[in-house]
Image: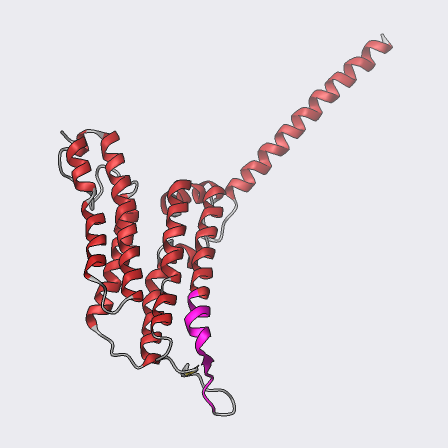
Amino acid sequence: MHLFLVKYTKAKGYELYKAAVLLYNTRMASKNNNRKTGYGLTADRERNAARIFGKHVSDEKALILVLATSFACLSPVLLGLRLWNAIPALVETGLIRPDGNDDSVPRAVLVYAVPGLVFVLNLICHVQLWVHQKAQRMPPKPVLFLGRHGIPLLFIPLTALWMLHAAGEPLQAVFFLTLFASLLMMLIGASFYDCPTDAVIAIRLFRLHQKPSDWAKVHRLAGICWMAAGLLQLIFLFAFDPVPAGLRIVPLILLLFPLPVAAVLGR
């Protein structure tokens, strides 16, 4: 009888231990899910918000975007090399040192280091977005605001403006219109890449929306072509003055190339 009571007590004690562990884990999970995040959301709501507002993209699209925007961020180096002889050895920054002198920088800093810094900032944004996407968390607010295109859109025109000003070149409206058109093409191409059938900006020809598989193929191709067209036009703009006629037509061919493919698939 004594042996039976000992075994019974041990069995009941083990069951009580398991129940206590389960209760503890349940309470901790509930506490973690209800904790407030930096956005004032619970963990569950943050995960849902991250899926909607966290700029989630596929790994393939994320890689394409980081490559395209990285080359775009480095493209002003071509403009600096073209204007190298016109840019003074010491470039004024407009910042005044405590001794009253201008805090000038060497020409190489403007041509190489500034685009390099923009490249690094862009890469940080992409890595931050990818890491937080994998963790199903909202990215930091500055990264969320800039997204995957904010750094190129902001700093490529500013870098080009600084180089042209340092070289004493006139600020032509055609140059900057072409620059912004190139960035806009890359932005539209990124939206094309995986756009749904109800997207506002899409190729709605040849009844593509009736065939989801063909819709996906055409828009994936269009996304790549439009991003490549924008990047090439940006490179040609910085590297040549004026751009050779033979090169001007290359971005146009890339922009129109998805249309015959859509016509063939939509038959």
Whether residue 195 is visible to the viewer of this picture, yes or no, is: no
Front residue (pair 31, 229): 229
Q: In the image, is 204 to the left or to the right of 216? A: left
Q: In the image, is 196 to the left or to the right of 47? A: left
Magenta stretch: helix, strand or loop mostly: helix
Residue range (magenta): 101-115
Residue lying farthest to the right in this orientation: 2
Front residue (pair 228, 176): 228
**Figure quadrant of residue 147:** bottom left
> Does residue 119 belong to the magenta stretch?
no
Q: In the image, is 267 to the left or to the right of 80? A: left
Instruction: Give the residue drawn at x 29%, y 53%.
Output: 186
Residue 170 position in % (x across, y down) = 25, 79
Q: In the image, is 34 to the left or to the right of 65? A: right
Indicate whether 87 appears above or below 260: below
Residue 104 position in % (x across, y down) = 45, 83
Front residue (pair 222, 133): 222
Instruction: Give the residue drawn at x 85%, y 7%.
Output: 1
Residue 239 position in % (x across, y down) = 31, 65
Instruction: Give the residue drawn at x 45%, y 87%.
Output: 102
**Figure quadrant of residue 111:** bottom left
Indicate whether 25 appears above or below 125: above
> Does residue 110 belong to the magenta stretch?
yes
Report the number of numbered marks: 0
Residue 47 position in % (x across, y down) = 44, 42
Q: How is the image coloured?
A: secondary structure
Whether residue 168 is visible to the viewer of this picture, yes or no, is: yes
Indicate whether 222 appears above or below 177: above
Q: Quadrant of the C terminus?
A: top left
